[in-house]
Image: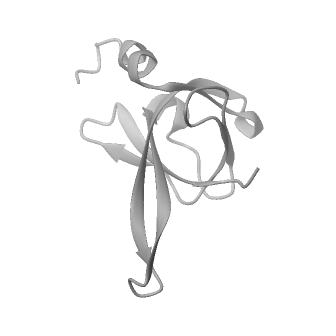
Amino acid sequence: MQLEEDLDAFLEEFGDPVSVPDLAVTGWGVFSQEDREVFGGAAVAPDYVMVARTDLFGGVDRGVQIVVASGLCAGAYNVTGPARQRGDGAFCDVYLARVPA
């Protein structure tokens, strides 16, 4: 995706509204849930990843909480590590763990 393209149009079509209350940031994120092996492959656990705009969410790091207001992924998540830029840097991956309700 080129930097001059409307990044929000893509995120709004495929994503959910997201906020980071501690940083006063709001925007959109596209969520995916993958399974990862734990206990030496004896079990699997969910691994959540959010794709979002780097200029908004690229500064989040471990310990920050992200809140998804609506959609299938609604709820609170803790960031588990620093955001990682994708491709040209317009988007980043944010790794998350769901906060139990």
Q: Position of residue 89 (x, y in %)?
A: 32, 36
> Between residues 26 and 55, which one lies in front from this camera angle?
26
Q: Is residue 73 positioned above or below 93 on the image?
A: above
Residue at (42, 22) in percent of width and height = 11
Which color scheme is applied?
one colour
User: x%, y% of residue 44?
Assistant: 44, 71
Q: Is residue 31 left or right of residue 26?
A: left
At 63% from the left edge and 34% from the top edge, which residue is drawn? 74
In this rendered view, identify the residue nearer to me: 22 or 12.
12
Where residue 40 appears, as percent x and y from the top left, is: 41, 87
Residue farthest bottom in this picture: 40
**In the picture, residue 97 is in which quadrant?**
bottom right
In this orientation, which residue lies closer to the viewer: 50 or 46?
46
Q: Residue at x 36, y 44 (%)?
A: 85
Residue 68 falls in which quadrant of the image?
A: top right
Q: Is residue 18 above or below residue 64?
A: above
**Circle count:** 0
Residue 83 x, y percent position in the rendering: 47, 49
Taking the spot 38% from the left edge, 12% from the top edge, the residue there is 9
Q: Nearer the viewer, residue 44 or 20?
A: 44
Q: Quadrant of the N terminus?
A: top left
Question: In the rendered view, would you say 73 is above or below 42?
Answer: above
